[in-house]
Amino acid sequence: MGEILGIGMTHYPAGLAPDHCRGWPLARYMRAGTVIPEHRRDPKTWPEPMQEEWGDDMGEKAHARHREIMFSSFRKIRKEIDDFNPDFIIIFADDQYENFTDTIIPPFCVMAYPDIAFQPFVRMGKRKFENIWGLPDDATIKTPGCHMEGRALTRGLIDRGFDMSYAYKPMHSEGLGHGFANTILYLDLDQTGLDYPILPIAVNCYGSSVIRFQGADASSKRKYPDEPDPPSASPTRYFQLGQATVDTIMENDWRVAIIGSSSWSHAFLTEKNDYLYPDQEADQKLLATMQAGDYAYWRDMTLDEIEDGGLQEVLNWHCLIGAMDRLDYKANVIGWADTWCFNANKCMAVFK
Ligand SMILES: [Fe+2]
């Protein structure tokens, strides 16, 4: 009989840089003039709470409060994991045109790496952002991987009807995509070391825009005819993947923390809001149903709803919620960092 702890968190890139870098996408877009239509570039056209958060410093002061909610939650999450003391940690996160590009886009992939080494600050360095720890841009972070467990998990998922892809080493030169890398960094926020072996499972969240927009916003340069890429798997399928993951863990008597990592509705994916702010109603619905244990709402969402609400990355949480549904676990939201300006609302939750 295995044991499982469930964790939901974010891998928000701008949290890795000090507030004065103003690393959130909206600040970048307002400086560079991309993606946001001309008639919405004047903050006076924005919803009132958004104008307040933006203030006279592009949100810099407000970002400190936003960060505090995230970081205090990450410390609580770390304590939960240490108390649980897992054999290893599974992270469901998206690959944003990092490891998987034009050569192949799998719907999901178990990264059964023997060892993990990654350079999380390379792309920050390209933007001239420092990091909150003052580590060099080319710093390499190492953690143990889960080669044998990854193989066994893949086998168990195939047995359960998932034609699972897997990999023994990365194609990506920086080692791990930022969804995984940032999650690992946030789990070790106080730089005391994180020794639990990590088993990343990549999820194709970006679906119809993963190659077209290169895992980013609609302003990216197109290499192919400008039409949607084929879709990701459905929310139902990712939900079922979480369920099958639980069954395989139980069969193997493993003790595992399962993490779903992503912010919720992303402003830069929400066309109906002119890419300015997230779909607040969609996020409130997710929060309410999750807290009520109405996981069927999540299971039955359509890809159209996902794309309409800029919820692509929430598909990582669909894997988590499917797992929690299988275990009949309840969500305890330990942090809710809501925002208009900082791209996405962030939910931090522990499931038992
Ligand atoms: Fe992401």
Image: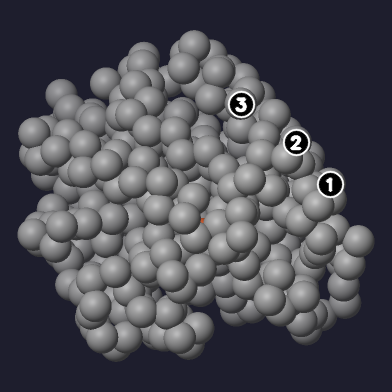
Q: Spot the residue most to the front.
A: 56
Q: Which residue is mark 3?
A: 284
Of marks 3 and 2, which one's residue comes earlier in the chain? 3
What's the CA distance linking mark 1 and mark 2? 12 Å
Quarter of the picture containing the N terminus is top left
Colour scheme of the picture: one colour
What's the CA distance linking mark 3 and mark 2? 14 Å
Residue 214 percent coordinates (x, y): 66, 72
Q: Which type of secondary structure does the marked residue at label 2 adopt? A: helix
**Residue at image location 17% in from the left, 28% down from the top:** 2
Residue 266 percent coordinates (x, y): 63, 50
Disc assigned to residue 305 = 2
Quarter of the picture containing the C terminus is top left
Of marks 1 and 3, which one's residue comes earlier in the chain? 1
Mark 2, Cα crowd under 10 Å, few <14 / some 14-19 / many 20+, is few
Q: Which residue is mark 1?
A: 272
Front residue of 98/141: it is 141
Mark 1 residue type: Lys
Mark 1, Cα crowd under 10 Å, few <14 / some 14-19 / many 20+, is some
Of marks 1 and 2, which one's residue comes earlier in the chain? 1
Mark 3 residue type: Gln
Q: Nearer the viewer, mark 3 or mark 2?
A: 3
Residue 243 percent coordinates (x, y): 42, 29
